[in-house]
Each structure stands twice: as C-alpha cells, then as structure tokens.
Image (cartoon, rainbow, N blue to C red):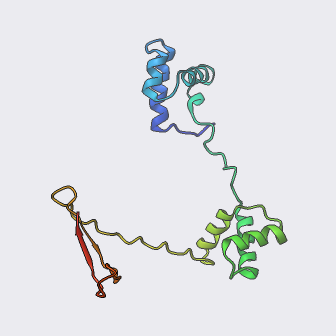
C-alpha cells in the first residue's frame, strides 16, 4: 500500500472518520454527511483504528479488472480474425473463436477489438423522423372530421359524395 495517495473524497472521509473516532461527531450524523449507512461508518472507524489512514484507502486501487485481457491474447485474437475471419461480423467471429480456437471471450470484447483495429465498422442508427404537432383548437370538439372515401353514400343517388362532418 506504500506510494498510494488519497483522493479528495478519501481525504474528506478521513476528516469525518477522525471526528467520529474522537467522539466529536455522531455516527448517524457522519453517515448522513458521507451518504452511507451507519454500519459502513462503524466499518470505516474499525479500519481507521486498526490501520490508520491506509485503512480508508480503497483496496481496489491498482488491482487489475476481472475482465482484463493481456496484450498478447488481444494480438493473437486480432491476427486470427484478420487472417481467417476478416469478413465476419463480431457475433459470427465470436462463435468461430469459441468453436475452433477455444477462446472464452465476450462478443462485446471482440466487437470492440474489431472496431479499434478497423476490421469491422458498426452500422449507423437511423434517425427517427420528428412529426410536428398540430396547433391546438380554440374550443373543445372543434376538430373537423372529413371522410374522403369515394363510396356511394345513398343507394338512391348514383353520385359519389365526400362527406364533411364538423363535430
């Protein structure tokens, strides 16, 4: 843990935890200030008493992600895709890499590698057409309803009528 620096958030947390440990501030009030529960304040105080300032520094700092892929594996994947699957999309390339080469890597990772190395380009999403709203009528029920179908309205008349109704 040597050589680790505290972030601004951890420094402000340290000041509040020191006040709680010195009984100058209640745990409930400190929890409200930091936006965490009282149980976490107790845990932070315990770590502060046991390890000092280092107890408040995040243990995740400097640790590799669980999904980390080494550069060697990335280069091997890229070379395989460029040689054999250069005209495949990410999903099909993923299936072939699992099936034939026994790589256990997510589709998203393969997709990102293919985009980064200009092997595959994502499709553009079409923009939705915006339909303008009509202006509101001044009175309720003022909409004009028109039926423009060319059907005979009365059986006696042979003319085709267009009906216009005002509601």
Residue 107 in the image, given as x and y percentages of width and height: 68, 64
Query: 71 or 136: which is nearer to us?
Result: 136
Determine the residue positioned at 27% across, 82% down. 161
Q: In the rendering, at what x and y percent does residue 81 appear?
A: 72, 76
* Residue 32 occupies quadrant: top left
Choose top left, top right, bottom left or bottom right for residue 157: bottom left
In which quadrant of the rendered image does the N terminus lie?
A: top right
Q: Is residue 45 left or right of residue 138?
A: right
Residue 16 visible within the image: no
Q: Residue furthest top?
A: 23
Task: Using the image as rendered, state which of residue 78 and residue 89 is in the foreground.
Answer: 89
From what the image shows, is residue 49 above or below residue 99?
Answer: above
Q: What residue appears at the point 49 percent right and 17 percent down from the top-left corner?
A: 27
Q: Taking 82 as reference, is 2 left or right?
A: left
Q: Quadrant of the C terminus?
A: bottom left
23 on left or right of 165: right
Q: Position of residue 155 (x, y in %)?
A: 34, 81
Image position, residue 165 (x, y; %): 24, 69
In percent of the image, x 44 and y 15: which residue is there? 25
Q: Residue furthest bottom?
A: 158
Name the residue nearer the viewer: 118 or 56.
118
Residue at the far front: name it.
156
């Amino acid at each position: 843990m040597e050589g680790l620096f505290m972030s601004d958030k951890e420094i402000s947390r340290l000041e509040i935890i020191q006040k709680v440990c010195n009984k100058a501030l209640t745990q409930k009030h400190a929890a409200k200030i930091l936006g965490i529960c009282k149980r976490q304040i107790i845990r932070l105080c315990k770590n502060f008493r046991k390890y000092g300032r280092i107890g408040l520094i995040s243990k995740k700092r400097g640790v590799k992600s669980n999904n980390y892929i080494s550069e060697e594996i990335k280069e091997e994947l890229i070379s395989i895709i460029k040689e054999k699957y250069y005209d495949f999309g990410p999903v099909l390339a993923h299936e072939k890499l699992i099936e034939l080469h026994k790589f256990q890597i997510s589709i998203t990772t393969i997709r990102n590698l293919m985009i980064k190395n200009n092997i595959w380009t994502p499709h553009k999403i079409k923009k939705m057409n915006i339909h303008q709203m009509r202006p509101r009528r001044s009175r309720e029920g003022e909409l004009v309803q028109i039926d423009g179908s060319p059907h005979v309205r009365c059986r006696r008349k042979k003319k085709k009528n267009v009906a216009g109704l005002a509601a």
